Image: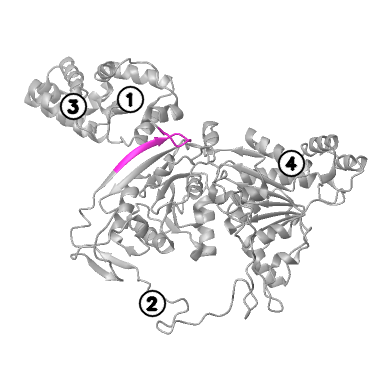
Amino acid sequence: MRNTGTIYAVFKSAGRTRWKNLGTDDVNQARELLAGEMKQEAKVDYYQDIAIAEVLRAIAEGRLRILLTLATGTGKTFIAFQIAWKLFHARWNLSGQPTRRPRILFLADRNILANQAYNAFSAFPEDAMVRIAPEDIRKKGKVPKNGGLFFTIFQTFMSGPPKDGKPSPYFGEYSPDCFDFIVIDECHRGGANDESNWRGIMEYFAPAVQLGLTATPKRKDNVDTYRYFGEPVFTYSLKEGINDGFLTPFRVKQIQTTLDYYVYTPDDKVVEGEIEAGKLYDEPDFNKIIEIKEREKKRVEIFMGQINQSEKTLVFCANQAHALVVRDLINQLKTSKDPNYCQRVTADEGELGEQHLRAFQDNEKSIPTILTTSQKLSTGVDARNIRNIVLMRPINSMIEFKQIIGRGTRLFDGKDYFTIYDFVKAHLHFNDPEWDGEPVEPESCPKCGCYPCVCEVTTPQPCPVCGQSPCQCPKEPCPVCGQVGCVCNKRKKANVKLADGKERNIQHMTATTFWHPDGTPMSAQQFMELLFGKLPDFFQSEAELRKLWSAPDTRAKLLQGLAENGFGHDQLVEMQKIIDAEKSDLFDVLAHVAYALPPVTRAVRADGARVHINSNFNVKQQAFLDFVLSHYVSVGVEELNQDKLRPLLLIKYHNSIQDAVADLGQPVTIGTIFASFQKYLYQPAAASYPV
């Protein structure tokens, strides 16, 4: 480790008492010395290295407010850890003297983020780490001050028992200069917002260097973040992350049903609540002012039938009650026998929900496999093996949409892509110019004409009765309903049971699309090339592919050549899954990728081939070929390989080749029959029926 005293020799030789007053030459030397400390056991990607260097540069130059903007899944917490590690071991602090290590605070707005950071910083000495929790403060009667790295949430700092009838938040028990370095995670949601009560915490600790971490570029709805911190010292976008191979691409399954909208008809039963006759109930209404359980059940049946039920999945629901309904429906429809297969994680679960989440994040554990949630898991879930995200509620904010997508973009061994199951048309956000594009500057304030607004903000006067702002006087109950916060005109959520037969008649349609990270659609061929590389040029046309595939010997040579170039059986099967063609022939995978032909099921191909078989073979030969086709439909094209002929004959003729010869002819004839009929499976006429 570098002698940290040399760092402070720079400060001393410059005659400065504060690190932030260094001259340019001093800054360069201090920056070089700080850059020498790194937690070497961890792999640092190039963009993380740049982010770390830029923050240290800003610190050395005396900046007190620093912002990093990096896409979800690119390791913002890891970057914060490396910066803290460097500062801690360099004995950097605001005093300008190497007499102590810095006191570092990690601030978040959710316990899950603070807990994850606490675990991510575990390489630090255990006695230096402090998790500030309200129950510990109440138990000990004071805030913890003995430590080097402190982790808490804004809500804890804002709480605290009133003193002399006035609020007394816990953060006030620390001196304003207690912390040298503060990391504010997801800062666009927390204290940087001018309207947030948490802003006072950050202003109270104004002497500290404050590093804001966010995944959202400057937009109209987070301009306060950028006003407070300034422009980011480094930005790394979702598009860059995917193109560099640090984040996974994704496909979107757009799902529509015949009950996406609802108008009440008298044959349906209103179980409780009030229904508005003639009203068109749309997506934002469901599970808030109207509930139709059959609709939710159908949606769960659809995605449970399409996902691999052993893959980790997040389901975003309208609210906590909806998340509970969906959890129960999933557990009713699952194939797993484990009672903990699907769990709800919302604010209502408290510590139990946190336990479920920790188990879900553990890549060594498979239970719970699916979590349902509302808002809680839209950010901060570092679960790298998430393969599916199901959207069952509208996503109205671009910031939230990008955060939810970010739940699936993290890399994991064997994870080439993830899938979004979209019931709510959220994929339309990809067409928004704000999706990973250049930020559009908001309009100037209509009053002052400036951007950002410089209008004077007047502080509301305290209530003359309670002296608080906003007023905290006890509210009088409504004289009619007796409730504090009148509910006289509030409609009770309508619970509707569909008439007999309507549930069975709910239809759905699924369209699978593939997306560039910049939000523009790409073809299946482009998506496949992104994952697997370009198909070798073993065929020059659709007709040539059909000819090669139609005979067992040339098909085998083609498959061997593809395997030698990285497109073996496992890769082709994975490609088959990506285009939802598991019931199709591997020929359809190649034809779809190379020529955009729609996949055709093996059953449809077999039906088309039977027409030609019945015209070209005798009755006994037809019976055998029909037997072969049944195996082809149920297993796949490998049942048509030449080496499968003898096993098929033994099964059909009960281990008697002699009986087979008696029915079908000599072995050479049988081989010709087996090979020659296959061309009828791949004629264009047989492929005229879509899946």
Q: Amino acid at mark 3?
A: Ala
Question: Which residue carries the number 3 mark?
Answer: 686
The reply to whether dot 4 and dot 3 touch (C-beta < 8 Å) is: no
Residue 209 is marked as: none
Crowdedness of circle 2 by 10 Å Cα count: few (<14), some, many (20+)?
few
Q: Amino acid at mark 4?
A: Ala
Q: Report crowding for label 4: few under 14, some 14 to 19, many 20 or more residues within 10 A (C-alpha).
A: some
Give the Cα distance between marks 1 and 2.
Answer: 63 Å
Query: How far across and down, in percent of the image, does residue 477 sit?
Result: 47, 82
Tell me the CA gap for discs 4 and 2.
Answer: 57 Å
| Callout 4 secondary element | helix
In the image, is 522 to the left or to the right of 679?
right
User: Looking at the image, which is closer to me, 30 or 333?
Assistant: 30
Q: Which residue is mark 1?
A: 590
Position of residue 421 measured from the top left corner of the image (x, y, whole percent): 38, 46
Q: Is residue 171 magenta?
A: no
Residue carrying label 2: 488
Asked whether residue 512 is drawn in magenta, I would say yes
Q: Earlier in the sequence, mark 4 or mark 3?
A: 4
Q: Is residue 436 left or right of residue 677?
A: right
Q: Residue at x 74, y 64 (%)?
A: 144
Q: Nearer the viewer, mark 4 or mark 2?
A: 2
Residue at the disc numbered 4: 58
**Image-quadrant location for residue 169:** bottom right
Q: Position of residue 321 (x, y in %)?
A: 41, 64
Q: Amino acid at mark 1?
A: Leu
Nearer-N-terminus badge (2/3): 2
Give the alpha-carbon distance from disc 2 to disc 3, as whole Å.
65 Å
